[in-house]
Image (tube, helix red, strand yellow):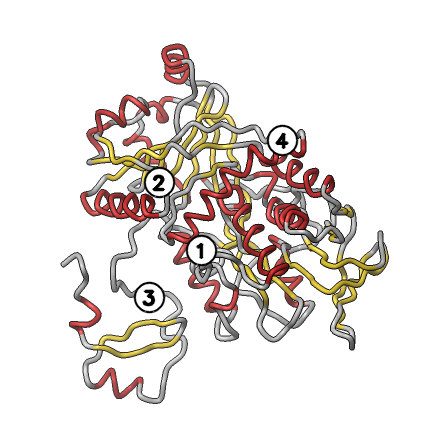
């Protein structure tokens, strides 16, 4: 391992490898990635590998669109196969309110150059024949949706970065990060020391531990996440014979599930309301390519709705159940950018949708590091949106709330209740006595009239 580098990336998942690749693409060749075990250890290796452009934050949606467009470039540079299945997908609305939300998302996407289409249930049924169309009122078709091979994609990022000058050190665990008097950093590892001007925390499940090495408690929590693989389904075989192609993806907001084809069967994942944190205080360093014990009882309410909406699933046998941890920030978006007050220490963590967002995270962070500006409005991902007030208790409560609401609509002026009240002003009790309706702004309670908080543009 070399003794000095312009930048050191800690973490060898898809996000860390993306940051490494984009730094070389932006012109920094003297960059090193340190991985405590092997590439993809942690969350990447057991991910479902889906990608899409749909996001409630339009700027994040634009970066997700960039991520998807990047995969062909990676294959050409690296010679590695990402295993792309660009099938397209439908987002299914089971209520009029959800259909209105999809129409809004389509309009915002069109403004950003992301083309989707609102379609009838007859059209949706033709695209995804596993559904009972009577359970839905409308759908949105997204042609830029699909899945890939998590391992192959990570290797494509890594090899492309190596071709462009980067180095990758495996079995190299960072044990201490020391700030030197001249402003550089020394990373103490089990394979020796390396100094650098810039440290990137892409530690994934271990991002909290990496942050603590420089005195920062990052607002991240790992959640248990289930998906299951079915046995071969005759409906899949019939569809492939008829169309010559794969079944498209589908997101069922009512069932809080997502699904896609996996060989001759289907993959079905759920963001259940009984959200369950994993290792809420510390992540074991010896956790690697491990899975957690499945809990079908916990996800059964979502499965019951899924079986009703997609009857063939109820008749299919379950081949395998995957339960693995993924990290989330309190609002579900990544933590990206410089950590305030610690020059030269950068974050690229809390990325729960690495194959939709990893490319955009790598692009914006590398531009920020090399040119001093991320090149996009990424406030929705900026680590600076959280401060010391985002304590561990606050983070745990908000992440659980966000996870359980992942497929639910956040209506205009809707106030969520987790981790409240967290911070109050000296006038808090006075506001309550006067009948104010309290709202939450970055952890701080602020008062307003009922008219201000309860009236929305939809009313």
Q: Position of residue 263 (x, y in %)?
A: 50, 21
Asked whether 326 or 152 is in front, the reply is 152
Task: Say which residue label 3 marks.
Answer: 417
Closer to the camera: disc 3 or disc 4?
A: 4
Asked whether 206 or 245 is in front, the reply is 245
Q: Residues within 10 Å of mark 2 (few under 14, many from 20)?
A: some
Real-space Cα separation, disc 3 to disc 1, in angstroms = 16 Å
Residue 399 appears in which quarter of the rendering?
Answer: bottom left
Task: Say which residue label 4 marks.
Answer: 76
In the image, which disc is placed on residue 302? 2
Task: Say which residue label 1 marks.
Answer: 332
- Which of pointers 3 and 2 lies earlier in the amino acid sequence? 2
Q: Residue at x 19, y 36 (%)?
A: 137
Q: Residue at x 27, y 24 (%)?
A: 125
* Residue 229 as seen in the image, left or right of residue 128: right
Real-space Cα separation, disc 2 to disc 1, in angstroms = 20 Å
Q: Are marks 3 and 4 in contact (CB under 8 Å)?
A: no
């Amino acid at each position: 391992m070399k003794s000095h580098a312009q930048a050191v990336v800690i973490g060898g998942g898809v996000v860390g490898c993306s940051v490494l690749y984009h730094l070389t693409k932006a012109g920094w060749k003297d960059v090193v990635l340190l991985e405590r075990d092997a590439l993809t250890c942690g969350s990447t290796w057991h991910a479902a590998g889906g990608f899409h452009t749909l996001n409630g934050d339009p700027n994040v949606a634009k970066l997700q669109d960039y991520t998807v467009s990047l995969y062909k470039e990676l294959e050409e540079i690296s010679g590695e196969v990402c295993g792309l299945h660009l099938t397209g997908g439908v987002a299914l609305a089971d209520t009029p309110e959800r259909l209105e939300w999809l129409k809004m998302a389509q309009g915002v996407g069109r403004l950003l150059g992301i083309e989707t289409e609102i379609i009838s249930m007859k059209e949706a049924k033709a695209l995804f024949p596993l559904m009972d169309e009577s359970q839905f009122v409308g759908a949105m078709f997204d042609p830029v949706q699909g899945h890939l091979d998590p391992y192959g994609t990570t290797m494509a990022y890594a090899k492309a970065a190596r071709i462009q000058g980067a180095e990758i050190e495996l079995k190299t665990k960072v044990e201490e990060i020391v700030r030197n008097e001249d402003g550089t950093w020394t990373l103490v590892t089990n394979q020796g020391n390396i100094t650098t001007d810039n440290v990137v925390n892409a530690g994934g499940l271990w991002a909290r531990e990496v942050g603590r090495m420089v005195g920062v408690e990052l607002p991240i929590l790992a959640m248990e996440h289930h998906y299951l693989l079915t046995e071969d389904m005759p409906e899949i075989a019939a569809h492939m014979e008829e169309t010559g192609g794969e079944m498209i993806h589908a997101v069922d907001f009512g069932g809080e599930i997502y699904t896609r084809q996996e060989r001759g069967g289907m993959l079905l994942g759920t963001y259940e309301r009984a959200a369950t944190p994993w290792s809420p205080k510390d992540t074991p360093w010896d956790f690697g390519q491990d899975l957690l014990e499945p809990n079908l009882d916990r996800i059964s309410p979502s499965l019951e709705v899924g079986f009703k909406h997609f009857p063939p699933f109820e008749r299919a046998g379950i081949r395998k159940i995957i339960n693995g941890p993924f990290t989330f920030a309190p609002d579900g978006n990544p933590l990206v950018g410089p950590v305030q007050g610690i020059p030269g220490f950068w974050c690229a963590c809390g990325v729960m949708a690495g194959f939709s967002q990893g490319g955009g995270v790598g692009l914006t962070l590398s531009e920020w590091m090399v040119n001093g500006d991320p090149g996009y409005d990424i406030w929705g991902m900026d680590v600076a949106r959280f401060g010391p007030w985002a304590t561990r208790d606050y983070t745990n409560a908000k992440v659980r709330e966000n996870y359980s609401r992942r497929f639910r609509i956040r209506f205009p002026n809707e106030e969520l209740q987790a981790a409240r009240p967290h911070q109050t002003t000296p006038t808090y009790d006075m506001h309550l006595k006067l009948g104010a309706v309290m709202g939450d702004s970055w952890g701080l309670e602020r008062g307003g009239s009922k008219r201000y908080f309860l009236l929305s543009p939809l009313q």
